[in-house]
Amino acid sequence: MNEQRKERIVKAFLWVTGLTSVFILLSIIVYIYVNGVGIISLEFLTSYPYRFEYGGIFPQIVGSLLLVAICLLFATPIGIGSGIYLAEYASDNILTKTIRFFVETLAGIPSIIIGLFGLAFFVHYLFGFSLLSGGLALGFMILPWTVRVSEEAIRAVPNSYREASLTLGATKWQTMWNVVLRSATPSIITGILLGLGKAIGETAIILLTAGSGLEAFLPISIFDAVGSLPVYIFMLATQGHTSAAFDRAFGASLVLVTMFLIINLGALLLRNYLVRRQR
Amino acid sequence: MTDLSRSEGRIFSDQYRTVQLSESKTVKDDVRMVKDKIDVRNLNLWFTDRHILQDLSLSIKSNSVTAIMGPSGCGKTTFIRAINRMNEIIEGCRTTGEVFLDGVNIYDEKINVFELRKKVGMVHQKPNPFPKSIFDNAAYGLRIHNMVNGKKLEKDVEQALREAALWDEVNDRLKESALRLSGGQQQRLCIARALAVKPEVILFDEPCSALDPTATAKIEGLIQRLKENYTVVIVTHNLQQAARVSDFVAFLYLGRLIEYGRTKDMFINPKNELTERYITGKFG
């Protein structure tokens, strides 16, 4: 009797906590939607910004996508390579442990510190405020994530596949390429896309490396400064000083949240599709 | 020192005999059943400090089915994996002794292990087709080794599937995923995949332990036919299966070879008490 009551109380408590999480997420999205939807128009999405209160956010949308693309080009090959190494080639020695320790620590470093490093190294020393600096610094941020998802996806491939390939006389690399990586690809792609969702909303790093956020032009090369949605929102919210600017921050936020949701949803659908194709 | 000179003498005589055989066709046909395909000598194997195989020596006849029997953990699987050197992918594995395949020591450092595994195919305990199409599974080894392509690839795949008695069941859906096949069909696909690269020896590691009786019967029939063209070594837990499919039986116990001989003799009249107790089901 008593135990039964305890059970019911615990269940109720867990139900409330679960509901709270959903409620928090929903309230943010609804709040952004309600405040931002009035701002959204074709003009807002396709024209260039002018001061804080006028124009659109086209360069910011394109800039965010380009930054994420550079980040992807950097973090994906290195991440997958390290993942393969850690999962398949590394023996359990001090070097491997060191690599793993550094990867995990890098994952926990606050983004502002990666941003500061990007500012000192990429911006001041190498490329200036630019698409390249921002993309690379973002890449630093999600690299540990891509390493981990790759390693885990590769480890999850059943050993019987490797055995089958090796007993047919395949080399280790042939086995990796033809069997293991192919089976791991859906999980790797999904994992990396989820990482990109994180990268597209990252503000501190971009603020210190890519540009002012208000850029009213598209970059012509990777060495040009580039606008981005998170920094644009940050600027409007902190420097705008007018209610018109503040409202536009919500419009830009709604666009950013939508892009984020599209990436996450896309990751989910793509995985389902790829897994089904293998069956 | 004396040991070494003795084994060298034996290599020479084996090679000599092989040469003799290929020179005279009539002799070859007569002696074919007698010819040793695999000759294991003083094989020892350790995983780190565990001594798994202890001083095994036996000769496996060409074009025959040799069953490896014994209770769980006696080293049966490790033994057949010594014949395609698959043990060495596990860290901490150490081997001494020799395994001759057609008179060549496969543990010689000059041996290309990938070529060896092409010659010595293997079928595993649980069917393990790749998550690829039926065709791509059967073609895997051919593609890896760049053996054939185009029309010839299709022909070779068909031949392998026919040899594995699977062609009639799958010829209209080669593009479908292999994972949609039944367990027994998957296992025959794995056999086809191994046959496609034209091996000389096929190792079966309890190939029916995950299958129902009907599928088991099909695989056993297949193994019987395969010995016409291949040398077959099969690990089995199942005494009836060993009696049904094998010509020779090796009985292992705790990493040692207890008894080895013709299946008929061994089942009717085991020489060793341990073998007798195992065969009569007193332990196992």
Image (spheres, rainbow, N blue to C red):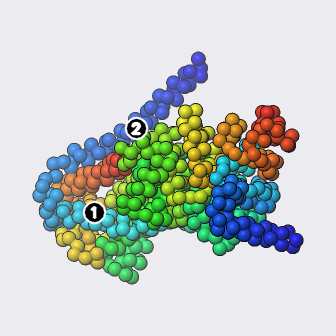
Which numbered tag is attached to residue A65?
Answer: 1
Assign the C terminus of chain B to one quadrant of the image: top right
Decide: few, some or many residues near mark 2? Use Cα within 10 Å; few <14, some 14-19, many ≥20: few
Residue type, numbered disc 2: Thr
**Sequence-wise first label, 1 or 2:** 2
Q: Position of residue A216 (x, y in %)?
A: 18, 69
Chain letter, disc 2 residue = A
Name above or below for residue A95 compared with residue B221: below
Rendering quarter of residue A66: bottom left
- Which residue is pictured at 65% across the width and 41% down the height? B245
Q: Position of residue A223 (x, y in %)?
A: 29, 78
Residue A146 visible (yes or no): yes
Q: Which residue is mark 2?
A: A20
Q: Nearer the viewer, residue A146 or B79?
A: B79
Please tell me whether mark 2 sits on a helix, a strand or a loop: helix
- Which residue is pictured at 79% across the width and 71% down the height? B8
Q: Nearer the viewer, residue B210 or A144?
A: B210
Q: Is residue B43 left or right of residue A259?
A: right
Which residue is farthest bottom? A125
Rendering quarter of residue B26: bottom right
Decide: few, some or many residues near mark 1? Use Cα within 10 Å; few <14, some 14-19, many ≥20: some
Q: Nearer the viewer, residue A109 or A272?
A: A272
Q: Is residue B81 left or right of residue B266?
A: left
Residue B91 visible (yes or no): no
Residue type, numbered disc 1: Leu
Q: Is residue A248 left or right of residue B240?
A: left
Q: Position of residue B200 (x, y in %)?
A: 59, 58
**Across the whole image, how many numbered discs are drawn on residues?**
2
